[in-house]
Amino acid sequence: MRITMIGTGYVGLVSGACFADFGHRVTCVDTDAAKIAALHRGEMPIFEPGLDQLVEASVKAGRLDFQTDLAGPVGEADAVFIAVGTPSRRGDGHADLSYVHAAAREIAAALKGFTVVVTKSTVPVGTGDEVERIIRETNPNADVAVASNPEFLREGAAIRDFKHPDRIVVGADEERARKVMGEVYRPLYLNQAPIMYTARRTAELIKYAANAFLATKITFINEIADLSEKVGADVQEVARGIGLDNRIGSKFLNAGPGFGGSCFPKDTRALVKTALDHDVPLRIVEAVLAVNDNRKRAMARKVAAAAGGSLRGKTVAVLGLTFKPETDDMREAPSIPLITGLLDLGAHVRAYDPIGMELAKHDLPDIAYAVDPYDCAKGADALVIVTEWVQFRALDLVRLKEEMAHPVIVDLRNIYRRDEMKALGFIYESVGRGTI
Ligand SMILES: NC(=O)c1ccc[n+]([C@@H]2O[C@H](COP(=O)([O-])OP(=O)(O)OC[C@H]3O[C@@H](n4cnc5c(N)ncnc54)[C@H](O)[C@@H]3O)[C@@H](O)[C@H]2O)c1
């Protein structure tokens, strides 16, 4: 199969590289010339474990290339995937579909022969209809079917997720589109990955329902964590106790600083907006958003409380900036409202992240950056663990304590044991496990 990927970001580049690895001939297109130039030099424009080797191997084998102009590769493609961004629209929280619509218009003009145009971007129900309308209006002679194939990969484990998905969802109303999509995913089907064919609108809704459900699970356990603190229970044991029930499942039950990232916040907001437009308010998802926003704001106050009440003039060390480990992605990272809150409370902030500091400097220009966790801790009155990078799980705690002015640790990911921290003489605050 010949595949063209429009948008070479976290989803487009990983999907394109994996499709090429399956044996398809793939061109990844992006309007960002700097990104394409970097890829031509063999440099990855994003951090994703294993991606550089995967890209290098497929480029060498002649199955993967990168371009800024989509006309040639779209004309030759059996399937064209749209993997451009769908951020929150400024002002109202709807998904901003301007990149998707622009891509549809450009694709339309370049189509030759029968082609399946597939939205892989996360798009509200009915977007496939609009993409089809745009294509037919721009190029009335196009022989095209429009399908939906939402992506479920997680940054940091994206290649594994793409190659071993729990399921593949294909929303296609035409049989010939299903046939092409079956060929595209045949290597995975041979690996027993279930392919679920649905109507296009159903596929679009599956993606939002999945993200809203996962965001709900996280928010639920976060509220149980708050209650645990008040009643003297341990939220991690509560989570294990409920998660071992197969009807509930143990994933996404880690209490923390509130969900962030490139998907959950914007997708839950967009789903709420779609539902309101259809006069079916989704009260649970609305509550999830409100609870999560409050929580992120509350984290700075939690740090202040651990540090004795006031942060004015104090130095706070922050470990971890990206929204999760193993990615450089800073989009809606919980570290941003936390650090903004710390600055508002009068603190000086010094931060360290193994990968995310360059991107973080755009969002957080007014803080200091350290070269390692111990440098970060130097003279600090409190240290906050925000992202659970594996490097932070086995710090030399004795050395860390020696570096700090006051041994106060706020562990927002519960990566350390309370008894161990107490024995070392720390004032240790975590999430849903009480203070020691
Ligand atoms: N990041 C994730 O973990 C993830 C997971 C599942 C789904 N998604 C969804 O996938 C979509 C893409 O997300 P992402 O994180 O990869 O975004 P991204 O911002 O990393 O990448 C989007 C790319 O599209 C390019 N682009 C925009 N308009 C273009 C055009 N007309 N032609 C060619 N390129 C164009 C941009 O330059 C950018 O490089 C979003 O809808 C997102 O919700 C993301």
Image (cartoon, grey):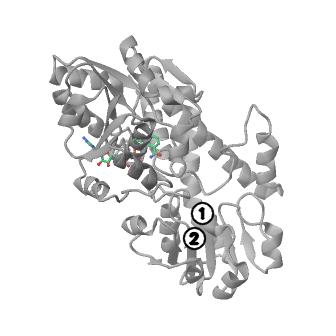
Helix, strand or loop under label 1: loop
Compared with 362, 314 (above or below) is: below
Name the residue beneath numbered marker 2. 319
- Numbered circle sitting on residue 389: 1
Residue 93 relative to residue 308: left or right? left
Q: Amino acid at mark 2?
A: Leu
Q: Secondary structure at mark 2?
A: strand
Would you say 390 lies left or right of 226 here?
Answer: left
Tell me if I can see residue 93 in this picture.
Answer: no
- Vertical position of residue 176 compared to residue 311: above or below: above
- Percent of width and height locating residue 349: 51, 77
354 over 155 or under it: above or below? below
Q: Amino acid at mark 1?
A: Trp
Q: Is mark 2 within 8 Å of ligand 1?
A: no
Q: Which image quarter has ligand 1? A: top left
Image spot of residue 108 (x, y percent): 20, 27
For label 1, count other residues whose C-alpha is less than 10 Å away and answer few (under 14), some (14-19) or many (20+): many
Q: Is residue 264 left or right of residue 145?
A: right
Residue at the spot x=47%, y=54% of the render?
48
